[in-house]
Amino acid sequence: MKKVAIILSGCGVFDGSEIHEAVITMLSVEQNGAQYQCFAPDVAQMHVVNHLTGEVAEQESRNVLVEAARIARGEIKPVTELNADEFDALLLPGGFGAAKNLCDFAVNGGEASMNADVLAACQSFANEGKPAGYICISPAMIPMVYGQGAKATIGTDADTAAGVTALGGEHIECPVSEFVVDEARKVVSTPAYMLAGNISQAAEGIGKLVKQVLAMT
């Protein structure tokens, strides 16, 4: 049975992993006959957002690994324990946590950098030629992982796409129901909630991405 590593960024669309995307990703892996293991960086979140009001909880601090464990039902490990040799593929759901906790794209855009441990984990899959799938805003990390000219999509938002281009990526516009493949680098991306109006629309593109990634193993 194929094994897939999933890197989460917390719990909640505004400051962590987008929960729908994370669950759809896990479900899609199993529906395609594979199994997954979740990972997350053991660091403090950039900030905590009250998801009812949308306001930042200034006095509150949460840990990315601890929060991501909510989605993984406790079955999660620090990203420093992720060994690409033990897995066939890598998946990164979106949510603002991907752009705040896994990297700082939400703050620095085209001058962003990644958490060192997350970058090392992602690059280990790239270096071994193992396929990976980046979802929603996560594809902003593709040029940071794969270098100049790597193909990626975040959908159609011009400002976000400009940030991906500034980082050295080749941004390709893509509808919510489809995905973009960089065949040479074996990396796949899909817009999900960068464009999706509901969970069904998000699920269509994510399901196709997971199937494509597994087909490339």
Image (cartoon, grey):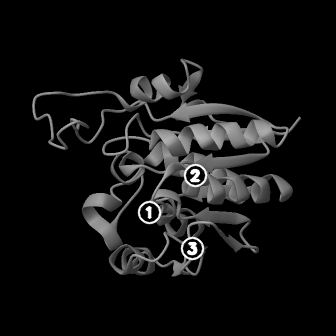
Question: Which quadrant, please, contains the N terminus?
Answer: top right
Residue at (63, 60) in percent of width and height: 205
Task: Determine which quarter of the picture holds residue 108.
Answer: bottom left
Residue 86 at least partly seen: no
- Name which residue lies at 10% across and 28% down: 59
Instruction: Reply above or below: 67 against 22.
Output: above
Mark 2 Cα-neighbour bin, 10 Å: few <14, some 14–19, many ≥20: some
Alpha carbon separation for disc pair 2 and 3? 14 Å
The quarter of the displayed image where residue 135 is located: bottom right
- The label shown at residue 30 is none
- Quadrant position of the C terminus in the picture: bottom right
Residue type, label 2? Ser
Q: Which residue is mark 1?
A: 194
Residue 36 sits in which quadrant?
Answer: top right
Choose the circle earlier in sequence order: 1 or 2. Answer: 1
Asked which secondary structure carries label 3, the reply is loop
Residue that label 2 marks: 200
Please indicate whether residue 199 sits to the left or right of residue 101 in the image. right
Is residue 53 placed above or below 149 in the rendered structure?
A: above
Instruction: Report the side of 133 relative to 129 (left or right).
Output: left
- Distance from disc 1 to disc 3, alpha carbons, whole Å, reads 10 Å
Query: In the image, what residue type sits under mark 3?
Result: Pro
Q: Amino acid at mark 1?
A: Met
